[in-house]
Image (cartoon, coloured by chain):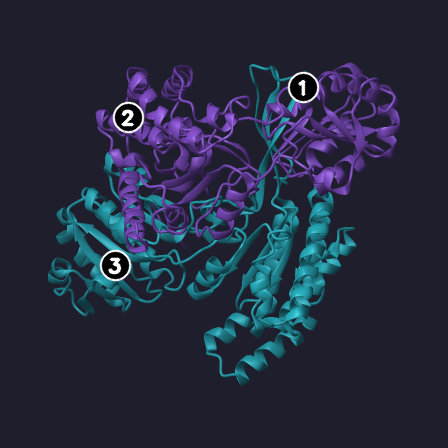
Chain colours: A purple, B cyan
């Protein structure tokens, strides 16, 4: 495509989405649920056919020398597709949040004022690699009464096209506009630049991918962005705490999985419990091959642990999101220093305190400036499903509009509803 | 100031605000209320002294040939100052929303998950003309536990400086950081450009002023903006309706005041009631000197009204925010055409239906895509005080984060709070 064609193409996607969004906003819950169940059925009926389209992406990825984990993430196995289908059915079974009215109260003038939850309108989603995100985003968009424009990675274009076709078929079956979910059909990068700069058509952009992608989009976007940068999460072991519980939770927070954004990267330990706690967790980390990057005091204790891989932490380590079997370890005086360290170095994603002291717990909850703050729980719980949101479109490290795991409500807005009986302003 | 000095100055404001915001976020309600009451007292004690500073602005404005209404808006009369003082006391009397926890529920894993309301951090406010906005913004900022940087208009710089000094004195008296409310002390325009491009220090920008100012700031800002563009509000007179009520409300919506953004600019009338309704409202508008810009059918009816100033509406009239004794008039088939017209031409601020039909009312509420939608009430009610928000920092015509009148909650965010008893993720 040349520049003019790209602009025309993207503007057409935008205006079609805008028209569809008005129809979706007033669609009855029943129709949206019919579409979601139809999509689940179509995913199951077309499992074999989808493998064929998916194979094209896989072959291309292998030929292009993509790493084995990257190739794995592209795969639409029958199991992945069944999970997608079940996700659609779960959404269909959930109550519809659109149209709910909250806080309706009578005012001194006589008017009653409340707020109605409505779809946000049109969202654009820019994502990389895993094609099942196409189904996750499409199904959330349908349930929330929005229209969306999806731009997947070029490496998954054949899979995404096949999936998007099924989504549009499901919408049509349900009597809803096919344009409610549009996939960008070209891998032309210009389209992304256009998509994030059409405030007349697009209400919010949700990028999902590496930090580079998200920084680029945040910088250039002319519409609001729900952005998730990095997850430099902390677990702070307080004095006093239940040492056995602290060992169990600090183990899980770091080693349950290394790659998710909610894995703990920094372990802060109160001096008063360090001599007791650190050798116990150090032994577990050593057995699991976790490198410990320590301050001098932490190192002095952990070097005594058999088989421990202990190194010196640099200033940069306190900022680092390792996404790997590495943890930074720092001793602190107590809750004050822990809060100060976290507010300085954390990425404001998720931070936890392990404590038995009520006052420390309350201060940590109130003063740590992160999207999720936890007491006596693993940072790994920071997740839309674990929080009971039913589904997750992303995790926001911003404070504006949506913060933390973003479910359907993040794709809605509240408008004021005023009911009167002929009242006028004095 | 030269460019380097300006940058250094603005960055200093930003980093001081950031430090102050952490202290404000954990300030007890009682201290914030002490500061607000101290500010009310100081405004009353310094009424005479404030007149002296205010007189400098007034003299300069007159010398510069500003229009009489502009000069009026600059005036800090004892009455204006008393209103400011009372506003501070009302805020002090209100419950503190900071720290409230909503929706705490146990999840299948055993963790309990809820959301805590916390200050957004630092907001920047850019406003024109009326110096009392300094007190409104400062008091809302204190109550909501934020820090703010205020940039008033150059025409009110002496008044704003004097008011800001009292605000800082009140903060200091209460044991809160003076930097929690900083006024930009220079009229250098470069500062605005810097202020809206410091995401490391400023969480949100709130511009209040003309459309040009807001469009410029929205275009150049690198942080979220709570923006209020124009108020092209509609009143739709449905078939069926209570004609007497419709006349009363349509009169108030247009003529109560011409300059506010929530005044009705467009009157839509269902054909079935036009012959009965239009001559009645036309007579009132004619008596009050309101020009009626009509479609052909409306004109045919209204030309029969004695003394009516009736002209032909152009396509541009449907978009216009007159802020003047002018109203556009258009006949429509019914609620469908009214909704379509409003969603096309309205500025998504406030639109009302006057009807006795329940189904029409429900459709209008659900389908009109505006920040405030009303049934049988004057659009003039779209206001933070009338909605019971206690105070108003602005009105948002956006869908993101805050929509409609923005009170204290618009200056807060919700973070997730997770309470566990040592749960780990499977």
Helix or strand or loop: what does disc 3 sit on? helix
Is there CB contact under 8 Å for labels 2 and 3? no
- Residue under numbered circle 2: A166
- Residue under numbered circle 1: A252
- Is the residue marked by circle 3 packed among few (<14), some (14-19), or many (20+) residues within 10 Å? many
Instruction: Report the residue at 74% width, 33% height from top.
Output: A363
Residues at marks 1 and 3, CA–CA distance in whole angstroms: 61 Å
Q: Tell me if I can see residue A73 in this picture.
A: yes
Above or below, comparing residue A3 to residue B324 in the picture: above
- Identify the subunit bearing mark 1: A
Foreground mark, 1 or 3, reads: 1
Which label's residue is closer to the chain start, 2 or 1? Answer: 2
Q: Position of residue B249 (x, y in %)?
A: 31, 52
- Residue under numbered circle 3: B318
On the same chain, marks 2 and 3? The answer is no
Q: Position of residue B65 (x, y in %)?
A: 49, 83
Instruction: Report the residue at 46% width, 42% height from top.
Output: A107
- Identify the subunit bearing mark 2: A
Residues at marks 2 and 1, CA–CA distance in whole angstroms: 39 Å
B124 left or right, relative to A266: left
Pick the front one: A420 or B14: B14
Instruction: Report the residue at 35% width, 42% height from top.
Output: A420
């Amino acid at each position: 495509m040349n520049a003019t064609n790209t602009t025309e193409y993207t503007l057409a996607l935008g205006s079609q989405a805008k028209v569809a969004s008005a129809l979706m906003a007033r669609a009855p819950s029943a129709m949206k649920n019919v579409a979601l169940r139809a999509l689940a059925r179509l995913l199951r009926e077309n499992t074999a056919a989808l493998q064929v389209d998916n194979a094209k992406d896989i072959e291309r990825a292998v030929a292009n020398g993509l790493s084995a984990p990257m190739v794995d993430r592209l795969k639409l196995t029958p199991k992945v597709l069944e999970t997608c289908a079940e996700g659609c059915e779960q959404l269909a079974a959930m109550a519809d949040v659109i149209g709910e009215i909250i806080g309706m109260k009578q005012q001194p003038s006589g008017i009653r004022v409340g707020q109605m939850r409505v779809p946000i309108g049109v969202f654009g989603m820019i994502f990389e690699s895993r094609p099942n995100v196409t189904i996750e985003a499409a199904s959330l968009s349908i349930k929330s009464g929005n229209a969306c424009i999806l731009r997947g990675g070029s490496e998954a274009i054949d899979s995404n096209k096949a999936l998007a076709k099924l989504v549009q078929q499901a919408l049509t079956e349900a009597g809803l506009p096919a344009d409610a979910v549009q996939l960008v059909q070209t891998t032309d990068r210009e389209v992304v630049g256009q998509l994030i700069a059409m405030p007349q058509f697009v209400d919010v952009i949700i990028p999902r991918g590496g930090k580079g992608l998200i920084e680029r989009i945040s910088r250039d976007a002319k519409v609001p962005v729900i952005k998730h940068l990095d997850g430099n999460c902390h677990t702070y072991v307080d004095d006093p705490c239940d040492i056995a519980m602290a060992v169990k939770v600090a183990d899980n927070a770091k080693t349950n999985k290394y790659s998710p954004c909610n894995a703990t990267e920094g372990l802060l330990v109160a001096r008063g419990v360090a001599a007791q706690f650190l050798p116990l967790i150090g032994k577990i980390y050593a057995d699991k091959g976790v490198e410990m990057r320590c301050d001098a005091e932490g190192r002095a204790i952990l070097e005594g642990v058999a088989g421990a891989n202990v190194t010196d932490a640099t200033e940069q380590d306190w900022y680092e999101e390792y996404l790997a079997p590495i943890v930074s370890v720092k001793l602190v005086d107590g809750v004050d220093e822990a809060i100060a360290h976290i507010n300085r170095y954390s990425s404001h994603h998720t931070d936890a305190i392990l404590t038995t002291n009520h006052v420390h717990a309350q201060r940590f909850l109130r003063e740590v400036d992160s999207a999720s703050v936890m007491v006596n729980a693993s940072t790994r719980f920071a997740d839309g499903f674990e929080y009971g949101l039913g589904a997750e479109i992303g995790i926001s490290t911003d404070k504006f509009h949506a913060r933390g795991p973003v479910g359907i409500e993040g794709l809605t807005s509240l408008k004021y509803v005023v009911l009167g009986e002929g009242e006028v302003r004095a």
